[in-house]
Image (tube, helix red, strand yellow):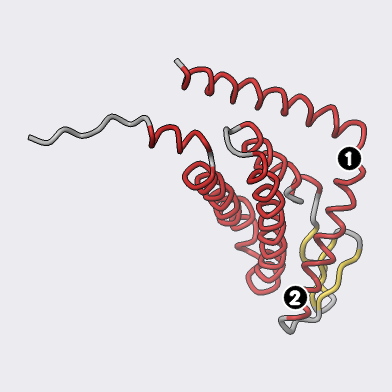
């Protein structure tokens, strides 16, 4: 019965955070969304320059050797994925202190992966433009979602109190 309450609490919490997300986005986060998009393009250009490419950003466009290769749009900046990640961790049972540490680290890692993704897409467009759409739509999407799923599983297996509950209340195996 206790496990059912935890599942119901998780679902209610997740729905509540989903509603809060749309309210916050309408009043405040839409400005941050645009800022994040521009910063991702700029940071991806810095990463490419560090690796030896003549890259620059013009607002949310990534340019290599004068070729405008990638336009970072707000749906591709990862903000919704970061919110989804954080919402899952908040809603899932676990110690608050560990959540306060795990969420910022996870958001940082998701953002870093997105910088690598954008730089990778720019290089894909530079060297093999005909494969850009496929890699944007499938390859990088699978990589990013798999990474976030991996972070969730790390939380569930290593840090959540639900996992500790399941381990301590598991029935003991009988020996013959």
Q: Residue 84: x percent and y percent?
A: 67, 39
Secondary structure found at label 1: helix
Secondary structure found at label 2: helix
Question: Looking at the rendering, in which quadrant would you find the N terminus?
Answer: top left
Q: Residue at point 81% right, 73% down?
A: 46
Choose the circle earlier in sequence order: 2 or 1.
Answer: 1
Q: How many badges with numbers are in the image?
A: 2
Q: Residue 134: x percent and y percent?
A: 59, 55
Question: Looking at the rendering, in which quadrant would you find the C terminus?
Answer: top left
Q: Name the residue under label 2.
A: 48
Q: Residue at point 87% right, 39% down?
A: 29
Q: Residue at point 76% right, 46% down?
A: 79
From the viewer's perspective, tell me whether residue 131 is left or right of residue 157. Answer: right
Q: Residue at point 60% right, 21% down?
A: 9
Q: Residue 43: x percent and y percent?
A: 81, 67
In terms of image quadrants, where is residue 125?
A: bottom right
73 or 164: which is nearer to us?
A: 164
Q: Name the residue under label 1.
A: 30
**CB under 8 Å between callouts 2 and 1?**
no
Q: Quick check: 150 above or below 167?
A: below
Per the rendering, the mark at residue 117 is none
Q: Quick check: 43 above or below 54?
A: above
Q: Quick check: 99 above or below 147?
A: above
From the viewer's perspective, tell me whether residue 26 is left or right of residue 113. Answer: right
Looking at this rendering, what residue extends furthest in the left direction? 176
56 or 29: which is nearer to us?
A: 29
Q: Quick check: 35 above or below 21?
A: below
């Amino acid at each position: 019965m206790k496990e059912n309450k935890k599942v119901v609490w998780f679902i209610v919490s997740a729905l509540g955070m989903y509603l809060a997300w749309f309210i916050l986005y309408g009043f405040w986060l839409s400005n941050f969304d645009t800022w994040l998009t521009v910063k991702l393009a700029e940071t991806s250009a810095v990463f490419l320059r560090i690796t030896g490419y003549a890259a620059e950003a013009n607002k949310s466009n990534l340019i290599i050797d004068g070729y405008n290769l990638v336009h970072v749009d707000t749906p591709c900046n990862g903000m919704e994925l970061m919110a989804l990640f954080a919402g899952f961790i908040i809603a899932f049972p676990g110690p608050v202190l560990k959540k306060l540490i795990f969420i910022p680290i996870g958001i940082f890692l998701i953002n870093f992966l997105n910088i690598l993704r954008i730089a990778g897409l720019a290089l894909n467009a530079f060297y093999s433009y005909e494969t850009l759409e496929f890699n944007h739509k499938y390859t990088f999407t699978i990589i990013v979602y798999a990474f976030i799923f991996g972070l969730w599983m790390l939380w569930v297996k290593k840090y959540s109190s639900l996992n500790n509950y399941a381990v301590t209340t598991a029935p003991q195996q009988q020996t013959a």
